Structures are given as structure tokens and as C-alpha cells.
Amino acid sequence: MAGLKRRVPMHSLRYFISMVGLFSKSGLLPWYARNPPGWSQLFLGTVCKGNFTHVIATKCQKGQKSQKKPSHLGPLDGSWQERLADVVTPLWRLSYEEQLKPVINGYRNKSTFSVNRGPDGNPKTVGYYLGTWKDGNIVCVRSNNLKNIPKKHSQVAQYYEVFLRQSPLEPCLVFHEGGYWRELIVRTNSQGHTMAIITFHPQKLSQEELHVQKETVKEFFIRGPGAACDLTSLYFQESTMTRCSHQQSPYQLLFGEPYIFEELLSLKIRISPDAFFQINTAGAEMLYRTVGELTGVNSDTILLDICCGTGVIGLSLAQHTSQVLGIELVEQAVEDARWTAAFNGITNSEFHTGRAEKILPGLLKSKEDGQSVVAVVNPARAGLHYKVIQAIRNCRAIRTLVFVSCKLHGESARNVIELCCPPDPAKKLLGEPFVLQQAVPVDLFPHTPHCELVLLFTR
């Protein structure tokens, strides 16, 4: 992974560059981007500055036709495994020289497996979905041959399937239609430690009946066939909703260690069952180094880490800053961040639990004393809440903002527009607008068209 470059196939950035054109027409960007060039060449260089024509080698060849997406659920033109790979890792047929050097396989440190009917109709199949609920053609296919899934993850999924097929309880295929056994999450670290989390719908089972099921699955993975997985820990969650947080339905440790740990940027990081951690560990190091370079922090800087997860970005930069302030919704992740800070001897950080839109305004009020504040935001795919954008725009102390996006279209694009638009009292956007200065794509997801995009804003 050390050879990973900050370059991605241009089709990963089509939407972003089209948005650049929109921003330029709206007068939100300082460079000319009315006619974005073609995408045939890889995004070049380490940082994109100024006119985007400087970072694209050539325009695409005239007459080049776009490729149509394969019809994965049409006539059978390949095995189920091939069709699944076409959906989950659509670039798998290309050599990574054609995608982006080098080839990285099995890079995911977290995988979520579903339970549903397989190609043979067996409802106790563990894997990934093909099809859509809307069309009623869902099929669950095993992940054994996916390039981005570690063999250890597929092994745990395979043994979970073995367990399900010997269990007298039915799986929960559609949440409101009954059944019990649901999805499986597998997390691993670079040392090979493995955490498994089983989600179970309790329905109307008594506590005694639930205890029997927990003991049965525990025995299977300790002394039964599942012992081959050599799990570091096994968690069990009684989920009475489609998705439950740890606060809504606590993760119950059936056996093993409560956490796994990872080494990242010279820090030892603690990871809880539901804490956010980038799914590509080595790629995350490149991503966080990129963020660090763009922040330009120094000993007089307060670093504000919004949506901080386990706090890795802020903690990796703590020695270069005056103070690190982190905000995160998931309480367990905040506890992990505090543990990581204490374990690594970092004393100039504090982490707050809750919604950023509620915590940030009050936290920023005390930072209007002239001290420089650099903000880093790494939101989920849904982007930042509107009130967070308001708080950032209206805090005069924030002169630099680094925005990490895994999905720049949709809400994140709205975030960018709101950050860069002229002051708008009607929307309570009173502060000076930001200007988008640099964009750095970092490929954390080989064999897929996705990438992280790091954006630098200043004002």
C-alpha cells in the first residue's frame, strides 16, 4: 500500500468536475472551469491547484463511446460469483495497471454480510445482495471470490452460514415478516485479530430462550466447527429495529476481547464494535497524511475535528497543534478516541459526544478571541447538517477547512455550495464565504469506481 498514489480513474471524479463547472458559472470558484476536459487520463499530481486543465493530461479521444453498465440480472452470461463481482467490484476484470497502480486485494478491514435466499433458493445463505427489493429479485451470493474481501472475512461468513443451516430458528429475511438470524459484521486488524458481530431479531423470545441461542452460537465458534475462524471476540446484538445503535440495543460480548487495536501513523488505535474506522487501513494512512498536509496547522492552531470517529485525524496532528477538539455522535467511538489519546500520551485533546449541529455552535463561541481555528470534517455519505455549515460559516476564527468526502454528489455537493456562496441572511449564512483551493483524490477502494476526495477551503 506504500506505493498507493493520490490518483484515481477520472470517471470517479466526473460528478465533482461537473460541479466545479456549476460553481464556476455561479461565481463560487476563482478559476475557469466552464468546459471541463475529458476523463480518459488518470488524475495527475499530488494536489490539484487552480485551473483543472493543469491536472488533466489530454482530452478524451473524439468519438470515444461510454461503456454501458452490464445488466447484472439479465440473461445468465456468467456465474453468480462473476455477477456479484460485477456489482461490488465492477473494475475487477481490469488489471490494476488499467485501474490505478498497484493492485491491492483483500484490503477491507470491515465487511457486512446479509442473510437471504441464495441462487439455489436456500434462505440461510450468507453473502451480498444482487438485485433490488423494489423489483423483488433479491439474491444473496457468497463473497468468496471478491477481490476486496479478505479470506478471513469470507471464512467467518461461511461458518456463520453453516451455523444457520443447523439452527432450528428461521432467518429474518424481511424485517417485519418474522425470523431471527440477521446480518453478520466482521472486523479485522493488521495483526489478524478478528471481531464478529451477529445481529439477531428477538421477536417474542423469552430471556431464557435468548440465552439458549447466545450459548449455542458461542459454543459453535469456541468448540464447534466455527472454532476454525479463531475469533478474537464475538458480539451479539438483539436488534428490535432495522438498525440499532449501541445505545439503543447494546452489543453483548459473548466471548473474547472487547476491542481490537490498530497501529496507524505511530498511534495505537482502539476500535469498538460500532466505531467508524476507514475500511482500508493502509489507505487511511495516505488519506490522513493528505489531510494533515492540507491543514497547515502549527503550534498556535486549534484543530476542530468534526465527525471525528475514533479521533485518528485529530490525534495524528495533535503534536503540531495547540489543541484538538473532536465531535462525534457515536459514544463508543468517543470513548475509543479518549482511550487512544491517553494511551499515546496526548494531553491537548478533548472529545465531545453528540450531534455536531448542536455542539459546534457553543464550542465555537469561545474561539472568537483571535486564535486560529482549522476545521476538518469527515461526514458520512449524507453530508453535513445544515446547522453545522451555518456554524462553520459564521465562525470568523475558522480560516481553513478541510472537507473529506466519500460521495461528493447529493448532500455533500449542497454543503460545498453553502460553504462557497455569498452571504445570505435568509439562510443565516452570514460569514465570509470559503474558496475551494485544492482537491486531492485518494483511492481507498481498489477495484471499485469510488474514492475519497479531500477538499481544501480557505477564506
Image (cartoon, rainbow, N blue to C red):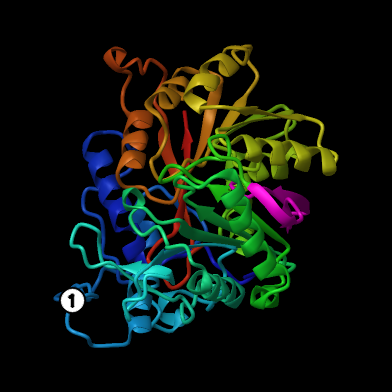
- Please say if 318 is above or below 78: above
In this orientation, which residue lies closer to the viewer: 217 or 150?
Answer: 217
Q: Is residue 354 left or right of residue 449?
A: right
**Residue beneath the point at 66% across and 59% down:** 215
Residue at the image position 76 percent from the left and 43 percent from the top = 340
Residue 244 falls left or right of residue 56: right
Q: Position of residue 81 (x, y in %)?
A: 38, 82
**Which region shows up in magenta?**
252-275
Q: Is residue 337 above or below residue 190?
A: above
Overall secondary structure of the magenta section: strand
Three-letter amino acid code at the position of disc 1: Gln
Q: Residue at x 71, y 45 (%)?
A: 316
Horizontal side, residue 203 vs residue 310: left or right: left
Badge 1: residue crowd in 10 Å (few <14, some 14–19, many ≥20): few
Tell whether 390 sits left or right of 31: right
Residue 162 in view, yes or no:
yes
Which residue was labeled with disc 1?
Answer: 64
Q: Out of 208 and 126, give the one closest to the viewer.
A: 208
Assign a secondary structure to mark 1. Answer: loop
Let me know if residue 42 appears in the view. no
Q: Position of residue 264 (x, y in %)?
A: 71, 56
Tell me residue 154's x, y (percent): 54, 74
The answer to if 256 sits in the magenta stretch is: yes
269 w.r.t. 323: above or below: below
Specify the quadrant of the image occupied by residue 29. Answer: top left
Query: At 17% across and 83% down in the image, what residue appears?
Result: 75
Query: Is 190 part of what is drawn in magenta?
Result: no
The x and y percentages for residue 145 are: 47, 82
> In which quadrant of the rendered view does residue 179 lie?
bottom left
